[in-house]
Amino acid sequence: MTFLNTKEFAQELDKQDELSSYRNEFSFPQVNGKNVIYFTGNSLGLHSKRAKKYVDEVMTDWENLAVEGHFYSEKPWWDYHERFANPLSKIVGALPSEVTVMNTLTVNLHLMMVTFYKPTAKRFKILCEAKAFPSDQYMIQSQVKFHGLNYEDAIVEIQRREGEHNIRLEDILSKIEEVGDELALVLIGGVNYYTGQVFNMKTITEAGHKAGAYVGWDLAHAAGNIKLNLHDWDVDFAAWCSYKYMNSGPGNASGCFIHEKHHNDTSLSRFAGWWGHNKERRFKMEPTFDPVRGAEGWQISNLPILSLAPYLASVEMFDEIGMEALINKRNVITSYLEFILKEISKEVNGSFEIITPSSQEERGCQLSVLLHGEGRSLFDYLMKNGVITDWREPNVIRLAPVPLYCSFEDMYNFGQILKKGIVK
Ligand SMILES: *Cc1c(COP(=O)(O)O)cnc(C)c1O
């Protein structure tokens, strides 16, 4: 498609956009009496009317039914989480029995490592990306320490090459081979939070297995953003938060995937609780743990229904739209934003550079832009003029044109504001 940097062209793309009506379901912060241009859905997705309605329902049921709400609410609480299995499995490419919702992301990754990181004298190394999201680094370091290992020996980081912004697949694969039979676990973010680079999860998972390791993925920036096929890729486990692309609200519950092939393996260790126990017998208060055969067997506590409510509203919306339609729009709007950035860069003498990979296979809904010679004052200017972006020191802005609620006209308007902010 040949793009134009004009308001009319952007409005025409909005007219052709099949998802445009969803924008009205979301609430945008206001600046100068107008909806902001919201580029931080990769950090916290917007509030939706459906999410509010679902939370209100739970509040009302609690008010009217109290403890009876567990069984007699319109959506009973005791099995509320089971409503996620179908829609969520389609979002991440899994069988319904392979996914569940519980806890929060870093907590789930810890729990998954209890099961899938079992270091021995020979096989004890974890492969991860250099400069991973801090929580992932702390999590991995603390797990290694928990097993009495020194993390300089046990953690192998894949580096970027000198002068490059992204990690090369060939470097990941050769590192996996090099670590070989010392490799216990590969654990990487499926989409890098800083650059927006999408990793080839299928190929990396295969290589990890070939070396005899388990392979897990942190999908914080991937779930609800890119096409995932966790089951077919033979991924051992994965977890993601729901408040980024899935708009479930601040700090909300995580989703978790455990491959079917592990469901009947009762030799795997796990930290157990009554909500992972055999469902028919859960309330018999038996002394011995008998896990549900499925991801639900990793549940620990009864679930926080008030936080699941907005997440449920969200996965139902995703189910209604389907990942394919979402990804189609994502590709066009991200490319349009890329085009606008390049046009503006020309007009202001090339003062910035996109560090996210340019191919559609290697990126989702995020462009990270390195602004040469611009400081935080540009970010402040954008904020004051109704553009919410994410600023990372010293000079990178991350832009996520989320297909559910961003418009093409937003992209055009952003370009104009950006230009004024640089030229001013
Ligand atoms: C957002 C994010 C997290 C956040 O973890 P929480 O446990 O939900 O606070 C962790 N890892 C990555 C890669 C993230 O992008």
Image (spheres, rainbow, N blue to C red):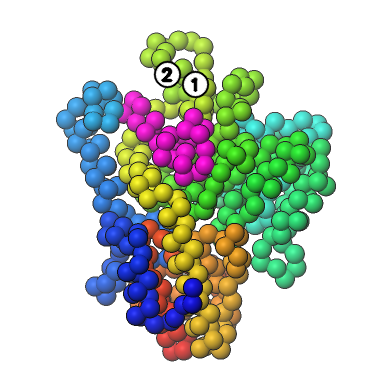
Q: Can residue 309 be seen?
A: yes
- Residue 314 relative to residue 106: left or right: left
Residue that carries the numbered disc 1 in the rendered image? 292
* Three-letter code for the amino acid on which mark 1 is drawn: Val
Q: Residue, x 44% and y 81% (percent of image)?
A: 4
* Three-letter code for the amino acid on which mark 2 is drawn: Lys
> In the rendered image of this protein, does residue 354 appear above or below residue 322?
below
Where residue 33 appears, as percent x and y from the top left, is 24, 73
Q: Residue, x 55% and y 68% (percent of image)?
A: 368
Q: Residue, x 36% and y 27% (percent of image)?
A: 79
Q: Indicate yes or no: mark 1 CB to ligand 1 under 8 Å.
A: no
Magenta-colored stretch includes residue 154: no
Label 1: element kind: loop
- Front residue of 354/15: it is 15
Where residue 146 appears, as percent x and y from the top left, is 66, 35
- Label 2, residues with CA under 10 Å away: few <14, some 14-19, many ≥20: some
Magenta residue span: 77-105
Label 2: element kind: helix
Where residue 201 appears, as percent x and y from the top left, is 63, 48
- Counting residues from the N terminus, which is met first, the one under dot 1 or under dot 2? 2
The picture quadrant where one finds residue 388 is bottom left
- Residue 378 relative to residue 145: left or right: left
- Residue 22 relative to residue 93: left or right: left
Residue that carries the numbered disc 2 in the rendered image? 279
